Image (cartoon, grey):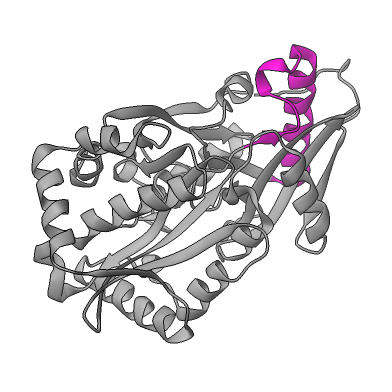
């Protein structure tokens, strides 16, 4: 399939790399809607590829798309993916206000960029709070990934809690009676202990090694100048029993990575920490607490756990774009991968069997 026509204009795009952090930061800040997942710092934490910001400009309007460039083993091609989380394109104009001609020119420029880089495909998890579908549905590759759950923090706290599952509400009240201490981490030792607790949590779940993180990762996540992040901990006396890295930007707060100590799993302090994060969000002036969805967009046990807190849903979408169908099909044949319609890109099915679920969901909390 070809996307090129003789009468299309010369592509008007440029690439921002990690060598020009200020320019990257400038595009993010000038966007009408953005999230921490669009920042350079967040992309540098993801070691799967080289972070780049594709920028198309036409007059005073720009569309920017943060990506990770990855090599494809034993092939003269590359592909692109997004960092874990809710990324996708951003702009200094609402996507709904963009003209059809500008969108067509963006598409032409992006495909030209993909061709020059011998890039086969691009995957991106989209942001449910930004209407990115308006732009990408005109390019192709837009797919539904189920639903994602959020809490409306603009309603009174009493109304929010009245919508909790009745059993959940009782459990949270019982947890508060236990006298647990909720605090923000303020020492490196607490970061170290949380890292140990988190990785033990992943061992218990028999998670893939890519779900494990170092103390340096959590320190870098917490200590940055591009987005907001704090580590919230719950103590039973002197023992750390639960924790969560909390991130927020614009109007949305999220529980990014969390864990519970094996000694207190049966008490489910994670239910208390979700309620606490909703209070923190209110203090920070956030409008929404995004809980996320299930693994791979499925209504699994994780989805059901989150649905105990709210029945407010948003469409969850992903972008699976093939720029070179011939090369894509060739790679699929060469890799002799299993034919799984839910996996993208299919030629990576053998190389990294857990990649798709991770790309589909940023929810690693338990």
**Which quarter of the rendered picture does the N terminus lie within?**
top right
100 in magenta: yes
Q: Position of residue 114 (x, y in %)?
A: 71, 40
Q: Position of residue 256 (x, y in %)?
A: 42, 56
User: 161 or 329, which lies in front?
Assistant: 161
Name the image quarter holding residue 303.
top left
Magenta part of the chain = 89-118
Q: Nearer the viewer, residue 366 or 143?
A: 366
Q: Is residue 365 above or below residue 196?
A: above
Total marks shown come to 0
Left/right of residue 234 with respect to residue 63 in the rendered view:
left
Residue at the (80%, 49%) spot, across then down? 26
Tell me the residue at 63%/48% (across/down): 38
> On screen, 309 above or below 221?
above
Q: Residue 28: where, in percent of width, then height?
A: 72, 45
**Would you say the magenta stretch is mainly helix, strand or loop?**
helix
Q: Where is residue 258, by image quadrant? A: bottom left
Quarter assignment of residue 343 = top left
Instruction: Specify the quadrant that holds the C terminus.
Output: bottom left
**Viewer can see residue 268:** no
Q: Is residue 346 visible?
A: yes
* Observer-nearest of 253 and 41: 253
Q: Residue at x 76, y 14 (%)?
A: 99
**Observer-nearest residue: 270 or 79?**
270
Residue 115 within the magenta-colored segment of the rendering: yes
- At 47% from the left and 83% from the top, the residue drawn is 187
Q: Position of residue 324 (x, y in %)?
A: 63, 35
């Amino acid at each position: 399939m070809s996307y090129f026509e003789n009468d299309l204009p010369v592509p008007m795009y440029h690439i921002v790399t990690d060598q020009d952090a200020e320019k990257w930061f400038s595009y993010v800040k000038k966007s009408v809607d953005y999230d921490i997942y669009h920042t350079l710092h967040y992309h540098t934490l993801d070691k799967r590829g080289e972070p780049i910001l594709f920028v198309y400009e036409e007059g005073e309007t720009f569309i920017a798309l943060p990506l990770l460039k990855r090599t494809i083993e034993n092939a003269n091609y590359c592909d692109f993916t997004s960092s874990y989380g809710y990324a996708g394109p951003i702009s200094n104009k609402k996507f709904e206000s963009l003209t059809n001609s500008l969108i067509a020119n963006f598409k032409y420029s992006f495909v030209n960029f993909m061709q020059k880089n011998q890039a086969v495909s691009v995957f991106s998890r989209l942001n449910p709070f930004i209407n990115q579908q308006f732009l990408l549905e005109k390019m192709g590759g837009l797919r539904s990934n189920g639903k994602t759950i959020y809490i409306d923090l603009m309603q009174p706290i009493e109304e929010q809690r009245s919508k909790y599952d009745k059993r959940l509400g009782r459990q949270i009240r019982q947890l508060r009676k236990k006298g647990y201490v909720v605090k923000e981490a303020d020492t490196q030792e607490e970061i170290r202990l949380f890292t140990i607790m988190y990785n033990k949590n992943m061992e218990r779940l028999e998670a893939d090694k890519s779900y494990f993180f170092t103390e340096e990762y959590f320190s870098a996540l917490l200590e940055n100048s591009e987005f907001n992040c704090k580590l919230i901990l719950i103590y039973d006396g002197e023992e750390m029993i639960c924790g969560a890295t909390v991130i927020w930007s614009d109007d949305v707060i999220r529980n990014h990575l969390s864990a519970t100590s094996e000694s207190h799993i049966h008490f489910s302090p994670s239910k208390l920490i979700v309620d606490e994060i909703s209070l923190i969000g209110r203090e920070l002036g956030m409008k929404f607490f995004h809980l996320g969805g299930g693994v791979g967009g499925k209504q699994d046990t994780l989805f059901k756990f989150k649905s105990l807190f709210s029945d407010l849903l948003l469409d969850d979408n992903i972008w699976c774009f093939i720029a070179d169908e011939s090369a894509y099909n060739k790679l699929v044949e060469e890799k002799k991968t299993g034919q799984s319609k839910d996996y993208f890109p299919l030629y990576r099915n053998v190389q990294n069997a857990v990649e798709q679920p991770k790309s589909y969901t940023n929810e690693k909390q338990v």
